Amino acid sequence: MRIVLERRDDRPRWLSFASPLAAVVLTMIAGAILFALMGRNPVAALKVFFIDPLSDGWALQELAVKATPLILISVGLTLCYRSNNWNIGAEGQLVMGAIFGSWLALATHGTPNGPWVIAAMLALGALGGMLWALIPALLKTRFGVNEILASLMLVYVAELTLDYLVRGRWRDPKGFNFPQSVNFEPEATMPLLAESGRLHVGFLIAIAVALTAAFVMARMIKGFEIRLVGEAPRAARFAGFDDRRTTLLVFAVSGALAGLAGIIEVSGPIGQLQPSISPGYGFTAIIVAFLGRLNPIGALVAALFLALTFIGGENAQIAMRIPLDVTRVFQGLLLFFVLGCDAFLLYRLRILATGRTA
Amino acid sequence: MPPLLEARGIVKRYGALVANDHVDLTVAPAEIHALLGENGAGKSTLVKILYGLVQPGEGAIAFEGRPVALASPAQARRLGIGMVFQHFSLFEALTVAENVALSLPAETPMATIEAEVARLSAAYGLPLEPRREVWRLSVGERQRIEIVRALLQNPKLLILDEPTSVLTPQEADRLFETLERLKAEGRSVLYISHKLDEVRRLCDRATILRAGRVVAACDPRVETAASLARMMVGADVGEVRTAAHEPGAVRLAVSGLSLAAADTHGTALRDVALDVRAGEIVGIAGIAGNGQDELFAALSGERGSAAGSVVIDGSAVGAENITARRKRGAAFVPEERLGHAAAPRFTLSENTLLSGHATNGLVRGGFVDRNAVSGWLQRVIKAFDVRMSGPDPEARALSGGNLQKFVVGREILREPSLLVVAQPTWGVDAAAAATIRQALIDLAARGAAVLVISQDLDELFEISDRVAVIAGGRLSEAVPARSLTRGEVGLLMGGIHGEAAA
């Protein structure tokens, strides 16, 4: 007997929606088994994880706050992955964006300024992320360096740079030697959307970015170019598109969006620089991009779901004393099942009865 | 002495195409046997059947006098049939010995393999260093690894698929010495080629295939290159269209065009020169892989060349990209329908945009004008009778003929002043082929310059005013089709220059 994966020629449309849903259901089942093995009631644990965070207004606001960086980053990553450019280093671009934007917040600290400060910080944040992402892009287009490794390794360079700054030059002199910067001035923080809670303007920016990206991909020649370069590189060259320029463009855009997410986090929910500013949004966004079918609107929906796992993980830690690492396990399971379900979307499983193999 | 291998009445059909039509082949012991034929004649199908990769629909095979059913390559190897493919399957990062080890049982010690590789390479004149990484090796050395791999199985019959197509003349000479040694040991070689001088020099017998059938079995040493070529391409000359009009000004002028090969299986262009005038169709004949891909890339601008080497309507465009050349009124149809001319998983609308986005008024300020795209698509569908299911299917959902009508029609409707088209009717049904050929003739009659690169001699003789032949990256002079015979073209295709009276 032999098990063969055969490429499907016809990909039914319903399957492309069913696949991510099936992945979510399978993740829940695997999670329930995991909780049972840990000696917890699986139904109660899943409720704490996935239902309770949706139960009140404050928690819904938190969901949006957590989803904001995921949306921004994953939308950029969908452009990259669609064009066959594997940017794995969004976490580093996020950190570099936070560093660039925060420079202005710290430089203007203690002096009276207008609301231009936060706007300029956002622009600088996007610039920082973009420049950081262009390093692997240039290495790829110039020297053929694998962008997966280059972008991933630059994450650690960015994180250690941040660590160095908050422990050194940018440390709050009155901060009792804690490795953190001063709290940002009100002009250097994201405006809030509600009186109570932490929901800020960044969430609206993220939604606007997702809608814009969806429009560009569907209706503009640039989106066509990005999709064509990934789908059929030879046809893209025949169409007159330069795949190296496309690589630079998508890295620049996704880096800028990751950098924007970084400065929004620092100037919004966190309010200062500290050694760790992200629970791994840049990596989780990879899962978001795939769960959202590499579609900006899909990524928007998937980001809200992944945000739930962050909040659910915190809830489960408080309510049921389940380790926070379970969040990461859930996210890993989800990516595993998304890719697994996608394999069945692209391939058909066939079991052949044969006497001998070639 | 009974024949080593005897195949009788082999039939293999792929849909409506009969790749092998009652083919007989007999290989004697200690014989170098040539399998000759044009591309698409059925040579590859036949050897895949003999190596157990493809199962024939009808026919019987006997090896050493006993009937055999070749269900898999493993079984063929056990019987004593080895094969060296045209495209190698080697891991570049591994050493020679490691690559050889992959085809042996896992427990074989590396030292044994290295010793064995050294022994075989000394015995058969196949110099190889067992510990060198493959990426450091030339194409000829890589081929030697494949031959050593096959020899490790101690084969009685070794099949080589166009082995010299990737070799330098010196490497080819060395290969012939090896093959002579194998023959002296009593082994047989089945040698697939379309290079006539090689076959005459090396082979004891030749079986010639044309359009899936055996047209002759002969002793190549007593034949001339011209007689072999005639058997290979068919002696019957088809209808030749006489030029109905005087050609006008030169629209495409190529001179001194040289371009490196695109990859290890490509062929570099060497000092190619060619003129195409308004109102004429010039055909370029040649066997695949002789520089056609490189020529198309250089003319279309997918690959740049020296500015003056390609001139369109008096402007040097060698350094311009394909979009700039389209804006000058040129249009292009590449050989590969799916993946090159069209993106398989994109809809026909999107594929209309693919080559027309810069020239056909389909994009305004960066926004795709969907109505304009749809209108353009409807015109192509109507003018070229493209049949399809649904209003806007994906390109891969169309049949070969209909997709070809789409990709040719997409360019012709632009009314280009220059059209470069490769394999316009490859694998297309007769009705679609006729539509496309008529469209090319009509386009030229309206004053465009048309260049057709094709392996189909019938097609070239039917539609071309002048014909040139590309072989080994060199292009012969384009001469009026009326003054040429198929035999002469066949000789040029086999790479023999100078003998043909043009």
Image (tube, coloured by chain):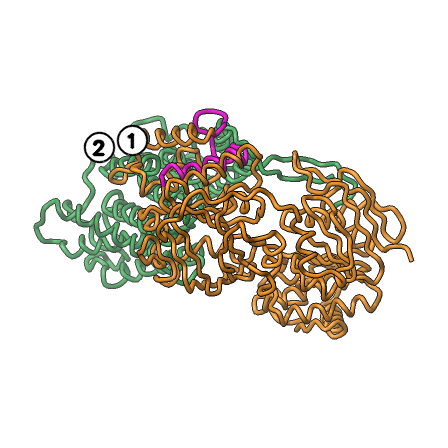
Name the residue at 39% across, 28% down: B378
- Relative to residue A297, is residue B194 depicted above or below? below
Q: Is residue B49 left or right of residue A9?
A: right
SS under mark 2: loop
The quarter of the picture where residue A197 lies is top left
Return the residue at label 2. A196
Q: Check if residue A122 falls in the magenta segment.
A: no
Chain in orange in the render: B
State the residue in front, B264 or A61. Answer: B264
**Residue B278: x, y in percent?**
38, 48
Tell me if A327 is positioned left or right of B67 in this view.
left
> Which amino acid type is marked by label 1?
Trp
Report if residue A40 is visible in the image.
no
Give the left or right position of residue B449, taking residue A119 as reference: right
Q: CA distance from mark 2 to mark 1?
A: 8 Å
B282 w.r.t. B182: above or below:
above
Q: Residue B326: in sight, yes or no?
A: yes
Q: How packed is label 2: few (under 14 Cα within 10 Å), some, or many (20 or more)?
A: few
| Dot 1 alpha-carbon crowd within 10 angstroms: few under 14, some 14 to 19, many 20 or more | some
Label 2 with label 1: CB-CB less than 8 Å: yes
Q: Hey, which residue is sitting farthest top in the picture?
A: B390
Magenta stretch bounds: B386-415
Percent x, y of residue A96: 30, 55
Q: Give the quarter of the figure containing the N terminus of chain B.
A: bottom right
- Residue at 29% x, 49% y: name it: A256
Chain of the residue displaying label 1:
A
Chain A appears what colour?
A: green
Which residue type carries mark 2? Answer: Ser
Residue nearest the viewer, comparing B68 with B358: B358
Residue drawn at point x = 67 percent, y = 44 percent: B211
